[in-house]
Each structure stands twice: as C-alpha cells, then as structure tokens.
Image (spheres, helix red, strand yellow):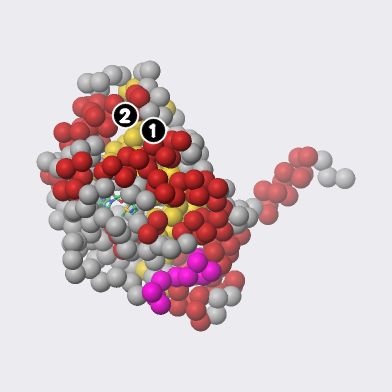
Amino acid sequence: MAGTGSLALIIVRTMKMLLDRYDRTINYLRLSITDRCNLRCRYCMPEEGVEMVGHGDLLTYEEIVRTIEVFARNGISKVRITGGEPLVRRGAVDLVKAIARIKGIKDLSLTTNGVLLKEYAGALVEAGLRRINISLDTLKSDRFAYITRRDGFKEVWEGIEEALRQRLSPIKVNVVVIKGLNDDEIKDFARLSLTYPLHIRFIEFMPVGEENDWNREEAIPSSQIMEEIRGIGELVPLGPYENGGPAERYYIEGGKGEIGFISPISSHFCAQCNRLRLTPDGKIRTCLFSDEEIDLKAALRRSGGEVMLEKILYHALQAKPEGHRIGDMRFKKCQRGMHAIGG
Ligand code: SAM
C-alpha cells in the first residue's frame, strides 16, 4: 500500500505546470469579457469614436468556460475577470459561478470600476467570488466626474461599502497615480487603510494604447508615492502572499488595511510574470505591451477540441516575450487601449 509520501508524489506528478521559454511558471489568466464600459476614464478610453467588438465576435460564456476548463487541466489555477467593465455584460454573475466551479481554479477575482457593485456584490459572493479589485482614482466627486467623464463617485463608494458588508476579502482599491490629475490625493488614499480593512494599491501609469498620451513625467514612480506616505506614518513591510501579485506590500502601524505598490515602469517585474490575457474577442496576449496576439477564438470555432485548445496554450507559452521594452529606444506603444485588452 502506498504511504502518504508516495501519495503526495503521485499528486505532484499528476499536477501540470506550465513553463514558458524563460522558465516562468504561467498559472494566471486575465480574462476580459467585454470592451464596453460605463465610464470613459481619460487615460484609458476615448469619449467617442471607439470601435467596439461586435456581439458575434465576443467569446460566448460557453466558449470561455470550455477554454478555462482545458487551461485549468493544464496548469492555469488563477483567473481574474475584467474588461471594459465586466459588470456591464449581461450574465457576468452566472459566468463567475461557472468559473468558480471549474476544477483546478483555486483563485477567482474580478476587477470593476464599482459603479454597479452595490447592486451585484451579494450575487457575486453567492456565485463564489471571494475577493475583488475596485478601481478608484479620486475621492472627490467632481474630480471623479472629470477623470471618468461620468458622474458616479457616490455609486462607487456605496459599492465599496457593500463589498465590505458582503465580507469580500481582500478588497483592493486600485489607484493609478498621474501627475497633475490626482497626485495630491496620495495621502488621503493611504489614510483609508487606517480606517478601513482596504488594500490600497498605487499603480504606476503605463503607456498602453495608441490613444493614451502617456509620458514619463506624468507617471509617478512608486518610490515617490512611498516617500509621501511616510509623512503619515511608518510603512511596515509585509511579505508577498499567495494572491498578492506583483505588489510590494506594507501597512501603516495601527492601520486596518494595507498599502501596495505596483511598479511596472520603475521596476518592471517581467521576470516574475505569470500571466496570459484573453481579450473579449478571443485573442491571447502574452504581454500587455505587445501587439502580438494568438487567435484562440478562430481555433475554438473551427474545432473547439481539447487538443486544439492545448496547442494554442502551448503556442502562447512559446511566444511569451522575456519582457517589455519600456525605457528602451525600441519600445513602441501597443495599439489597443487598456479597455480593449483587459486591465
Ligand atoms: N472597468 C474595470 C475597472 O475599472 O477596474 C476593469 C477594466 S480597467 C481597464 C482596469 C484597470 O486598468 C483600472 O484600474 C484602470 O485604472 C487601469 N488602467 C487603465 N489604463 C491604464 C494605464 N494606462 N496605466 C495604468 N493603469 C491603467
């Protein structure tokens, strides 16, 4: 009879691990289910003239679930649903429920702008969601209307309160810091982590999409944000945790929440990158900043067989670049904006 040691060995042997050409373990799929959004954040999506993916070109929920089932059997264990705004696509809660049940998916999360969260938080928890990321770049209602070109601050704040009531945990609040736009609110956001069990995550502004007029001067490095927060209190470092992603984590003495820094520009973390992206129109992107895409939808609609999906997955592993080239003369911004790729 096999002892517990050999049983463990059998389990390890049957667990698949996806390695790319640079020996990175790829276990994370960032899944965008729509390019539509109920906001128009100035640095993310143009107000008008955006060509949207036609309904027939969107991956259906059945196609998405089929893909994730096959990917999960091969080593993908984390999925984040995003967009556009995922909660504007009809049936998003049903998709959460279906993905939460897929064998091998150990971590499921969702990124939302929070506008519809008050309405959906309870149903999302019932569907199996345990944690959430909410994007919010300002705590001022009029500035929110300026940045997003829509009213909605009150709805987002009520969405955060509902997420707290529903005990989603962690609740990460993502703040993209842009010079002259919201950098005067760094301390106010950091202070939220004193009063609420929120994980405030400051994200460096990135050059994504031809339409975004990124420039280096507007992208405030994490080191500068940290310096400013030290004016409130000591930042005590926390180690990485399983679902921490690339954030450097801290808390302020006595605080209920955390503060994290995501620094794709100032200290890029490509060597630890564990993710693939799937766009709403069914293209796999192996790097946020690269225009190279692999047409999963065409393969799905041609055969949809497990072997075909596995072939696509392994092709993506081979194609994943070593890193982005921001800061290098050869760097060229990718064409699609964040709303169309999935942020
Ligand atoms: N609608 C959802 C939301 O607002 O969270 C999901 C999609 S949105 C594109 C995801 C995240 O990408 C948001 O936090 C947004 O602020 C961020 N984002 C968009 N463009 C960005 C850029 N150029 N640099 C850094 N973050 C960006």
SS for tag 2? helix
Image check: 226 left or right of 7?
A: left
Residue located at (49% from left, 45% from top): 122
Task: Tell whether position 60 is magenta.
Answer: yes
Q: Residue at x 18, y 61 (%)?
A: 47
Q: Mark 2 or 1 closer to N-term? A: 2
On the rendered structure, is 18 left or right of 157? right
Q: Is residue 186 visible?
A: yes
Neighbor class of circle 2 (other Cα within 10 Å; few <14, some 14-19, many 20+) is: some
Kindly give the residue lying farthest to the bottom in the view shown: 302
Q: Quadrant of residue 256?
A: top left
Query: Residue reaching furthest right?
Result: 1
In this orientation, which residue lies closer to the viewer: 13 or 154? 154
Residue in the picture at 45% in, 74% down: 297
The residue labelled by disc 1 is 198
The image's mark for residue 192 is 2
Q: Is mark 2 within 8 Å of ligand 1?
A: no
Residue 75 at x, y = what percent? 57, 55
Name the residue type under label 2.
Answer: Leu
Q: Is residue 268 visible?
A: no
Say whether residue 281 is left or right of residue 73: left
- Separation of disc 2 and disc 1 at Cα? 7 Å
Image position, residue 321 (x, y; %): 37, 59
Q: Which residues are magenta?
A: 55-64
Quadrant assignment for the C terminus? bottom left
Q: Are marks 2 and 1 in contact (CB under 8 Å)?
A: yes
Q: Is residue 164 above or below residue 6?
A: above
Secondary structure predominantly adopted by residues drawn in magenta:
helix
Callout 1 amino acid: Leu
At mark 1, the secondary structure is: strand
| Snapshot quadrant of residue 232 | top left
**Residue pictured at 27% horizontal, 32% vertical:** 189
